[in-house]
Image (tube, rainbow, N blue to C red):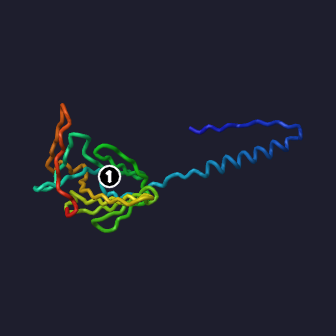
Amino acid sequence: MKTIAYISVTTDVSGNFMRHFNAILIFVLFSFVSSFEIADEIKISKRFPKSWTQLSKTQNGFVVYDPCDGSTPTIKLNNFFLSINGQHESKEHSIEKFTRLSDSSYHITCDNSELSIVVKWLDRSKSKALWTIKLNNSLSTHIYKMVMCPTILSHKFRFIDNPCSTEKIGEEEFLSVENH
């Protein structure tokens, strides 16, 4: 909702001051309103899933793991934002650019290039992909790798639940996804 305050000033000098004041007020309001940037909608490929679930690597392949403490990490996209929902916390990032690099890989740039993500399909059935997430800040660069599956296909993977109904218990240990 926009609220515009109108200031009324009277003068007895045949209204000249009022005309100049109104012109200045309109110019200032126009300058203020035009300084706001409206985010452009990013066109994400229709073939690229918008909702992803993290997979964990075991000796027998990949699984969907539901930890005792927190929830299974997910990533969700729309044409403006990318939300990374970690095991304990979530963060929303403003998408700047979505680029298809090849038939099997994509690049997503967010937050004034502070977040750079490369998504590469690991199989022909497009059931799992390696997400390489590079976070740049003024002090350092961090790189995280996760194997994710489109959430709609998560039922194709074995599910491991680590329930903790009465007290917190240790989480499962999984293999590194470095060599997927």
Outermost residue toward the right?
Answer: 13
Q: Is residue 83 left or right of residue 127?
A: right
Outermost residue toward the left?
Answer: 60
- Decide: is 34 above or below 101: above
**Whether residue 92 is visible:** yes
Q: Is residue 145 left or right of residue 170?
A: right
**x then y, percent, for residue 76:** 33, 49
**x then y, percent, for residue 123:** 20, 63
Residue name at image x 14 percent, y 54 percent: 58
Image quadrant holding the N terminus, namely top right
Foreground residue, 75 or 51?
75
**x then y, percent, for residue 68:** 21, 40
Number of marks in the rendered image: 1
Residue name at image x 46 percent, y 58 percent: 112
Q: Residues within 10 Å of mark 1 (few under 14, many from 20)?
A: some
Residue 145 quadrant: bottom left
Image quadrant holding the C terminus, namely bottom left
Foreground residue, 108 or 40?
108
Residue name at image x 26 percent, y 60 percent: 130
Q: Secondary structure at mark 1?
A: loop
**x then y, percent, for residue 152:** 24, 49
- Residue placed under numbered mark 1 in the picture: 50
**Whether residue 123 is visible:** no
Foreground residue, 90 or 105?
90
Foreground residue, 115 or 136?
136
Q: Is residue 112 left or right of residue 13?
A: left
- Decide: is 168 above or below 86: above
- Amino acid carrying label 1: it is Lys
Residue name at image x 42 percent, y 60 percent: 97
